[in-house]
Image: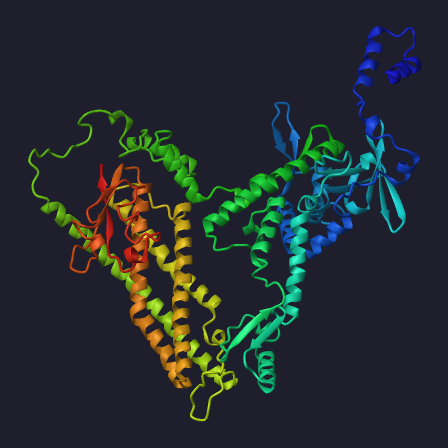
Amino acid sequence: MALLDYIKSKFIKPDMTDVVASQYEELVAKQSDTFSLIASPSKFIEKLGVPRNESVGTYRDFGRTYMREVWVFAAVKAIMEAAADVPVIVTKLLPDGTEEPLDKHPLIDLMTNVNPHTGRSMLLESTFGGLELMGNAYIEKVRSHGGQVVELYPLRADRVKIVPHAKDYIASFIYEVGGSKVTFDAKDVIHHKTWNPLDDFYGLSTLEAASLPVEVDLLAQVYNKSFFKNRAMPEGFFVIKNAGKDQLEAAQAQLEKKFKGAKNSHKIGMLGGDWQWLSLGLKQKEADFINTRKMNREDILASFRVPPVIVGVVDGQFAANVQEQLKIFWKLCILPKLQRVEDQWNDQLAPEFGDDIRIRFDKSKIEALQEDETEKVERISKKIANGVITPNEARSELGLDEVKGNKALDMFYISGNLVPIESAGQQNALPQPPKDDKPKENKAVRFKQVERWQEFVKQLTKAEDAMRVDMERFFRKQQREVVRNVERNESDQRVTLSVNGSMALKQQILLEEILFDEFDAENQLEDIGTSHIGAAVQRSGTQALATLGSSFGFNFRSIEVEQFIANKVLKFKKGINETTREEIRRQLVDAQRLGESITQIQNRIRSVYDNAAQVRSLRIARTEMVGAGNFGTLTGMKQSTIPMQKQWLSSRDDIVRDSHSAGVGVDGEIKQLGEPFSNGLEYPGDQNGSVQEVVNCRCTLIEIVE
């Protein structure tokens, strides 16, 4: 307490009252005693500033990493651009504690035109980018002659050093460029920083926490570059048993011509003779290269709290997953950062314009956080079904006019069959079907089931035909591509013919150059699958709700529906391509083994696609439409508010498979909506079922209302 005694002796006269003396004591007591421990500047520190604790790398290293490491660049850029895109508003604090947005104010002008050389977006990007890369971001406040802040300039964090103060914590900031220095008073710099457990003055860079996966990923990229630069194959030798000198030289020249260089990497070749590869190094596959890079990517993105889809890593994700990841990105990554910067501005910038002035990020303008119209309708519909609001109140929430003169729209309802609350629990409140003490034979029930199956087949046939036509076109187009590829191989002399036009066993044919472009084929199949499968789900779901008399529409945008479509389309396109490629490979290998001519090879390919267009197209369409349609029916049942069970219904004709037939199979089984049938399937055509249970199935579901 020596400081307190010193102030008393200097400033408190003997005749001052005890009240004045106590005020001085209170003033001094407000100063932190810890500042003098951590911020006692020596002459050296006053001149150079407090050194940064750069344990992993320098700020310059962090900047270079941002420019070289793709996932760091992508994550930081996503954060900067998202944060900078949020509008900034100025509000006035009212006596009741609420805030009123201002239309005109000097601070609005400042935040709109921060300086003649830097736009608002660039100021925000440098702020959020500096926090991510270096843990620190600095903004210079430029004042007019009257002391008012009139411009804001971002300062590079690697050029700033902090000069501490024993009482005020920070005395000044030193900005150094090429040996020249400028010293800013503490009140003229806004210092944004992240929390650093081992430093009192500087924030912690996210790159320090992510340094290991970043370094490993950079090394993996360097290795990959060297791998492809060095002939795109590991070092080693081909060993040809019982080969003479001439044979070895000819084989080496042939291999160099066919496979050397990055453009010839990953091609599949067929070589005659007794070959053996002797590797002298570690292969990429053995080093688990792809998985290692994927793990590094996940660790890096997790450090920045950026979901993969935000930086373009889709990996088969569907729209619902993308939307959810976008919301997670904003809620868990961007919003907390906006709040920290906002708090700092309200502490160090807004008071320059008045104690009642606040700076806010207008979060209501963030599109990713706006409630989807379908979600809003679904949320309000649930309120109606649970007796929370009336239909007219729901219309008001949706921005619609209330319907006057209809008492039913001003009543509260409960879930179930949606009866008015006044009628709930009353006997005979609703008309009841007459009781039959002696039920008749189930002929009427059976007739109804036959009608339902026939209606299902009628709708199925239309969907089948539409998808079958698209699949047939797809296979015919692919057939022309592959047949042309065979001709190209001949013209490019990649397939050498003997005198009689046949292919010798020891000659080569590069299968990958004959086979179709898998990436292009998957894109085409994805378009076909998404269109037809999505339509089948929506059509069946809508029909199910209409049959049940539900007043709600089918929610096609639910996560369950979108995930189903995404998974089904993924299996659809992968499975079709794999089946086709393997059949073509088998035909080419057989043709080469038999020494067939180019014409004979082309005929083999045509036969593969003739079968695909005429037989596989129908089988594929039927299998996909049955599965998608029955999923839509089941989902429609779940989305209704009516308690019910599901029943498996087959055609009961001569071609129904035994496991689906009546008596010995699942036909007629009744289960709860979330319970699988005895064959393990939740519905006919369930994509998780075995091929034997799913392919060419013509069964459907019907509802059993409890």
Colouring convention used in this rendered image of the protein: rainbow
Quadrant where the N terminus is found in the figure: top right
Quadrant of res 584:
bottom left
571 or 49: nearer the viewer: 571
Relative to residue 642, is residue 349 drawn left or right?
A: right
**Residue in the picture at 41% in, 64% down:** 525
* Residue 363 showing in the rendered view: yes
Is there any visible trace of residue 527 in the rendered image?
Answer: no
Residue 88 relative to residue 681: left or right: right
**For residue 40, side relative to residue 531 (left or right):** right
How far from the left and from the top, in percent, is residue 297?
60, 52
Question: Measured from the top left, where is residue 80 in percent x and y?
Answer: 65, 48
Asked if residue 35 is positioned above or below residue 618 in the image, the reply reads above
User: x and y percent of residue 162 in the render?
Assistant: 82, 38
Residue 696 sits in quarter? bottom left
Please give left or right for residue 392 compared with residue 548 in the image: right
Residue beneath the point at 42% across and 70% down: 581
Of the 4 image quadrants, the one containing the C terminus is top left
